[in-house]
Image (cartoon, helix red, strand yellow):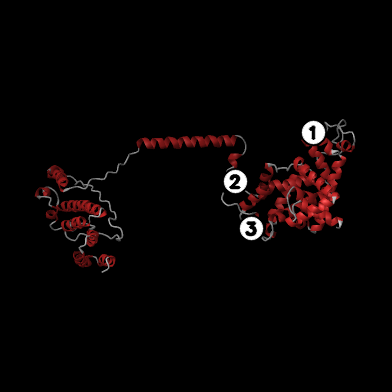
């Protein structure tokens, strides 16, 4: 082999620029060529010396700053806080002061924070409403701004699969007092609109209570009892906001209880009130 | 933070006006570039000047960078050209002069190296061994030195070195071979091995 070519191959081998196949064959050639082998060993030792005793020099820090200044490149804002000795100390002191200040404010806030306790007010029964309204018999209280009793009526989906709908607006408030069975004494000293409002709220609350009971029964497989309960709800509280949903659930329970004929009849009633809901029920029960 | 962009992507971003990309490129390559310049020229002050000039040139010539090429090849082409120009212009000597710095009682390092009777304690420190190597490197001509430094210190392949220096791969390998042989010869004359053994003892 040409000595020059041999040396070039030696360099390729030395610096790992040879394919694995070539490396393998070259190793065999080295065994037969002691001069090249000697050169390889020497070069390897030389490389090791250079690596160990000729370390890489790092660029001084000021070089970069000087370069950026020369090029008109602004240094990063945080560099102001990281250079020198005093600046980092000042920065550290500022951070500590800020942290203490925030911690102090947070602790003050937590001491004086009003804890809001959410109470789920029990659904007011008729017996409960009467004592509430009785205080309005007091003429003194009647002259003051009326107190709005807060009855929490959480809105939730009581029946999966049914699309939520907006409760129909109440078009007639006639006979509400009688239907709610609040008694004659309840209206003494209270403005009429206020009574109506209270009755609506009472209906909502009681209706919801009954609705929840029916759902529980249905979940436990007591379809007949749930259907009866829902029927009672619909009949007693015609202005219950989720009345249509309750009707649909009653239909569902009737089918499951084996009273298909009654259920189909009620679908027809539901069609007059909510065609879409009736359609859903028909589709669900294969009508 | 986030995914590290390649040098080529950052250079393209700089070409489009993102100065922070240039800053990042400087930070990534400053040590490698400085090391090459310093080892090539052998003088710290001159290396700092050439470092500045090289990066200023890179900053101004950014539009000449072709995105399909490797950034480091383009970078070191400019740096190498700057080093060669400076070397030829000023004919730099080693900061630690081999001819002494004027003190009469100081033994000249070159005399020490040439002598057969080298006191073992003269070259016992790592810094002194480094000086021997620097001297050996300094004895190479600029073509051999640049090839040696680009391969040994910067890790470029022979093909890349050929692109940087503008010669063929065979010429690069030939220069490398001469560089290795030259270093070996110089170190052998300085009885480097014996001194290294003494130090280790």
As rendered, which of A282 and A106 lies closer to the eye?
A282
- Residue A187 - label: none
Disc 3 target residue: B12
What chain letter is assigned to the residue under label 3?
Answer: B
Residue A206 lies, in percent from the top left, at 19, 51
Q: How many marks?
A: 3
What chain letter is assigned to the residue under label 1?
Answer: B
Determine the residue positioned at 58% across, 44% down: A77
As rendered, which of B126 and A177 lies closer to the eye?
B126
Spatial separation of the CA atoms under disc 3 and disc 1: 50 Å
Determine the residue positioned at 12% across, 44% down: A137
| Camera sees residue B176 | no
Spatial separation of the CA atoms under disc 1 and disc 2: 46 Å
Mark 1 closeness class: few <14, some 14–19, many ≥20 residues within 10 Å? some
Callout 1 secondary element: helix
What chain letter is assigned to the residue under label 2?
Answer: A
Spatial separation of the CA atoms under disc 2 and disc 3: 21 Å
Disc 1 target residue: B199
Q: Is there one chain holding both mark 2 and mark 3?
A: no
Residue A235 lies, in percent from the top left, at 16, 58
Q: Is residue A178 left or right of residue A40?
A: left
Callout 3 secondary element: helix
| Camera sees residue B47 | yes
Residue B98: image quadrant is top right
Q: Is residue B34 left or right of residue A133?
A: right
Residue A161 lies, in percent from the top left, at 31, 60
Disc 2 target residue: A76
């Amino acid at each position: 082999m040409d000595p020059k070519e041999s040396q070039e191959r030696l360099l390729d081998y030395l610096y790992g620029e040879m394919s694995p196949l070539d490396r393998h064959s070259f190793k065999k050639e080295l065994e037969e060529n002691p001069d090249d082998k000697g050169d390889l060993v020497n070069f390897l030792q030389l490389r090791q010396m250079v690596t160990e005793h000729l370390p890489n020099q790092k660029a001084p820090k000021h070089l970069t700053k000087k370069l950026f200044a020369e090029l008109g490149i602004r240094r990063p804002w945080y560099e102001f806080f990281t250079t020198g000795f005093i600046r980092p100390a000042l920065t550290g002191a500022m951070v500590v002061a800020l942290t203490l200040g925030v911690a102090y404010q947070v602790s003050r806030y937590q001491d004086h924070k009003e804890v809001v306790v959410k109470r789920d007010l029990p659904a007011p029964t008729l017996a409960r409403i009467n004592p509430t309204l009785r205080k309005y018999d007091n003429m003194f209280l009647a002259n003051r701004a009326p107190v709005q009793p807060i009855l929490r009526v959480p809105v939730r989906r009581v029946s999966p699969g049914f699309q939520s709908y907006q409760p129909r607006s109440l078009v007639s408030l006639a006979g509400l007092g009688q239907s709610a069975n609040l008694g004659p004494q309840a209206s003494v000293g209270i403005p009429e609109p206020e009574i109506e409002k209270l009755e609506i709220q009472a209906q909502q609350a009681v209706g919801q209570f009954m609705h929840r009971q029916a759902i529980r029964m249905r979940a436990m497989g007591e379809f007949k009892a749930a259907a009866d309960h829902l029927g009672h709800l619909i009949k007693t509280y015609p202005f219950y906001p989720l009345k249509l949903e309750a009707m649909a659930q009653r239909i569902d329970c009737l089918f499951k209880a084996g009273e298909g004929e009654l259920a189909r009849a009620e679908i027809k009633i539901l069609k007059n009130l909510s065609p879409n809901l009736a359609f859903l029920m028909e589709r669900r029960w294969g009508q | 933070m986030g995914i590290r962009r390649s040098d080529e992507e950052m250079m393209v971003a700089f070409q489009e006006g993102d100065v922070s990309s240039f800053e990042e490129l400087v930070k990534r390559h400053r040590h490698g570039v400085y090391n090459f310049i310093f080892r090539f020229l052998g003088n710290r002050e001159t290396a700092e000047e050439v470092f500045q000039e090289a990066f200023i040139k890179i900053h101004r010539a950014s539009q000449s960078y072709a995105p399909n090429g490797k950034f480091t090849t383009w970078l070191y082409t400019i740096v190498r050209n700057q080093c060669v120009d400076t070397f030829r212009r000023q004919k730099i000597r080693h900061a630690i002069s081999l001819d002494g710095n004027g003190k009469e009682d100081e033994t000249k390092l070159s005399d020490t190296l040439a002598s057969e009777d080298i006191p073992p304690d003269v070259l016992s420190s790592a810094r002194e061994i480094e000086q021997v190597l620097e001297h050996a490197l300094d004895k190479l001509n600029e073509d051999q030195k640049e090839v040696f430094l680009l391969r040994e210190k910067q890790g470029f392949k022979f093909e890349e070195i050929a692109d940087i220096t503008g010669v063929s791969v065979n010429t690069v390998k030939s220069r490398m071979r001469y560089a290795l042989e030259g270093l070996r010869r110089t170190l052998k004359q300085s009885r480097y091995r014996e001194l290294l053994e003494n130090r280790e003892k």
